[in-house]
Amino acid sequence: MIAAAKINYLQGRIARNDDQQAYRELFVIFYNPLLHFARSFLSSKEQAEEAVSDVFIHIWEKRRRLETVSNLKVYLYIATKNTALNYRSRQNKHRTEDLGEMATELKSIYFNPEQLLITAEMIQRIRQAINQLPARCRLIFKLVKEDELKYREVAEILQLSVKTVEAQMTIALRKIGTVVNFDIQKTVSTRPCSSQ
C-alpha cells in the first residue's frame, strides 16, 4: 500500500486544484483493495465494482470537502463498506450486520526472501488455514496483513474496538500457527554446509 504522505499529497491536489491526474492515481492505488473489501459484503463482483465506482464518483463530486478528511484511506474503506451495505439493503436481501457472515477473499500472500524458503506444500497449508478462519477473523486478517491497515484503522472501518481487532488477529495467528504446525526440518531442504 502507499505511504500516508503520498495519499495526503494526492488528496490536496484533488481538493485544491481539481487535479484529474491525482484523482486517477488515487483511483489506481485504491481500486483493487477496495474492490476486494466490497466483495466481503456483496455477492457479485459486478455489484462490488459498481459500489467502488460510486465511492470514487462521490469523491470527485465532493472533492472540495476532501481537505476536511483527516485519514483518506480509512474514509475510502468506510465509504465502500457503507455503499456496499446500502446495495445489499436495496436488493431486499437479508441484511447482515454481523461481520461473521461476510465472505472475505484474500488475493495473495506476501513473502519476504526468508519466507521464500517455505515449500509449495507449506504455502498451501497456510492458505487453507487462512480460509478456515471465521469470516470476521479472516476479514480483519486481510485488512491488516494484505491491505496494510493499522489496528485502529480496521477498528474504525468495521466499527469495532481496537481490542477486538487485536483479539481477532491473535486468534487468526494462533489458528494459522496451529494448522500449519511449522516444522523447519520438513520445510527446508537440508544440505551439508561447506567448511570454511
Image (cartoon, rainbow, N blue to C red):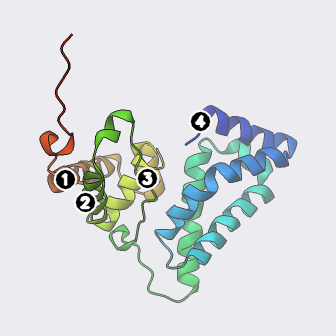
Q: Earlier in the sequence, mark 1 or mark 4?
A: 4
The N terminus lies in which quarter of the figure?
Answer: top right
Mark 4 residue crowding within 10 angstroms, few (<14) / some (14–19) / many (20+)? few
Q: Is residue 162 above or below residue 38?
A: above
Whether tag 2 and tag 1 are in contact, CB under 8 A, the answer is: yes
Q: Give me the disc on residue 4.
A: 4
Give SS at disc 1.
Answer: helix
Distance Cα–Cα, label 2 vs label 1: 7 Å
Three-letter code for the amino acid on which mark 4 is drawn: Ala
Mark 1 residue crowding within 10 angstroms, few (<14) / some (14–19) / many (20+)? some
The location of residue 73, given as percent across then percent down, is 58, 47
**Occupied quadrant, residue 58:** bottom right
Three-letter code for the amino acid on which mark 2 is drawn: Ala
Give SS at disc 4.
Answer: helix
For disc 1, the marked residue is: 180
Horizontal placement of 127 versus 29: left or right? left
For disc 3, the marked residue is: 143
Give SS at disc 3.
Answer: helix
Distance Cα–Cα, label 3 vs label 2: 17 Å
For disc 2, the marked residue is: 129
